[in-house]
Image (spheres, rainbow, N blue to C red):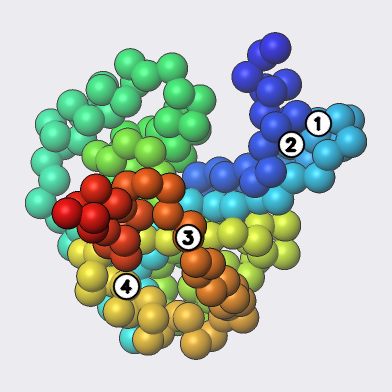
Amino acid sequence: MSPRSWRQKQVDLYLTWGEPPELVKEKIEQVRAKAAAHGRKIRFGIRLHVIVRETNDEAWQAAERLISHLDDETIAKAQAAFARTDSVGQQRMEALHNGKRDNLEISPNLWAGVGLVRGGAGTALVGDGPTVAARINEYAALGIDSFVLSGYPHLEEAYRVGELLFPLLDVAIPEIPQPQPLNPQGEAVANDFIPRKVAQS
């Protein structure tokens, strides 16, 4: 069974890296059709970095700062390393910027600068809260229902996303099930039970 046919028969959620919406739409349509041929329905998710600030200008300045100290030699070495991989996803990321600094805004507010030196997910949504929220909603309209977001520096960007972006999104907070009591089976279960031999001595 090829990896692609296995994917259509087994996967419940197909996660893609951040590409321009038209490419994501094309990918969703292909995967959805293949899954339907097996009588399956697949959900879709996307992996993106986020650079959100009070204004669009501040966000783009922050994006540029992330790569401002990279020299062309460092970028070339990273791109050469990525070129040795047989990962189709990595090849698609590289094709978005071709290892060059110019034209890194590959779609409105979708920036490929991260991918100049980082393998894997190499794009970021850049802008103020309302702008980034609008872009996320565009992906949601294509059928994306799971978003894996990150940013640099991690902690600081997490606060910005929480303050500037999340209030603008219809973010579903799942119910967290209450833990069920565990029945001990001889030894300690977590820190709630003492091993029987010790308890008897």
Q: Secondary structure at mark 1?
A: helix
**Is residue 106 visible in the rendered structure shown here?**
no
The reply to whether discs 2 and 3 touch (Cβ–Cβ < 8 Å) is no
Q: CA distance from mark 4 to mark 3?
A: 34 Å
Q: Hey, which quadrant is residue 158 in on the image?
A: bottom left
Q: Is residue 41 left or right of residue 128?
A: right
In the image, what residue type sits under mark 2?
Val
Q: Earlier in the sequence, mark 2 or mark 3?
A: 2
Q: CA distance from mark 4 to mark 1?
A: 36 Å
Residue farthest along the top direction in this orientation: 1
In the image, what residue type sits under mark 4?
Ala
Residue bearing mark 3 = 182
**Is residue 182 visible in the rendered structure shown here?**
yes
Q: Is residue 166 left or right of residue 77?
A: right
In percent of width and height, residue 62 lies at 24, 68
Q: Is residue 79 left or right of residue 95?
A: left
Q: Using a 10 Å C-alpha cutoff, classify the residue at mark 1 as few (fewer than 14 neighbours), some (14 to 19) or many (20 or more).
A: some
The residue depicted at 28 percent of the width and 71 percent of the height is: 157
Q: Earlier in the sequence, mark 2 or mark 4?
A: 2
In the image shown, does 31 or 115 lie closer to the viewer? 31
Q: Quadrant of the N terminus?
A: top right
Residue bearing mark 1 = 34
